[in-house]
Amino acid sequence: MQSEIDEQNKIIDDIRAKITAEKNAPMIKAQQEQEAREAELIRIFEIELAVQRILDKQVTNQRPTLLSMTPIPISTDRSWSNYAILGIAVVGFLLFLRSRA
């Protein structure tokens, strides 16, 4: 008698599990689809991150080097004739202003 009761309880438990699985099937399917979408988004994000790192590395390699802050040496072989002409022009301008005063 106990074996028949156990067998009937097993059948009832199997039917209950089947009904519960059928009832929860849409929810389980939606959860699996959501997990698949999240996995796809993570994969796309990782690809974009890798591409961005590669582009940043290329931009870094293409940047020009900074110029040195050392002063440019002044050439000492300048002609004094340029200064002489400028001096004569200044003196002439001052004499012109003096004559007008």
Image (cartoon, helix red, strand yellow):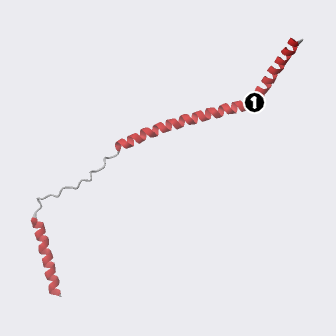
Compared to 29, does 8 lie above or below?
Answer: above
Quadrant where the image shows the N terminus: top right
Compared to 13, does 30 lie above or below?
Answer: below
Q: Residue at x 15, y 80 (%)?
A: 94
Q: Residue at x 69, y 30 (%)?
A: 29
Q: Residue at x 11, y 74 (%)?
A: 88
Q: Is residue 76 left or right of residue 63?
A: left
Q: Position of residue 32 (x, y in %)?
A: 66, 31
Compared to 69, does 20 lie above or below?
Answer: above
Q: How many tags in the picture?
A: 1
Q: Is residue 2 left or right of residue 60?
A: right
Q: Position of residue 5 (x, y in %)?
A: 87, 15
- Badge 1 element: helix
Residue at the outermost front position: 2
Quadrant where the image shows the C terminus: bottom left
Q: Is residue 41 left or right of residue 101?
A: right
Q: Position of residue 36 (x, y in %)?
A: 62, 32
Within 10 angstroms of label 1, few (less than 14), some, or many (20 or more) residues? few
Q: Is residue 4 left or right of residue 33?
A: right
When asked about the image quadrant of residue 37, the answer is: top right
When asked about the image quadrant of residue 84, the answer is: bottom left
Residue at the outermost bottom position: 101
Q: Residue at x 51, y 36 (%)?
A: 46
Q: Looking at this view, is 9 or 56 the one in front?
A: 9
Mark 1 is on which residue type?
A: Asn
Q: Position of residue 24 (x, y in %)?
A: 75, 30
The residue indicated by pointer 1 is 24
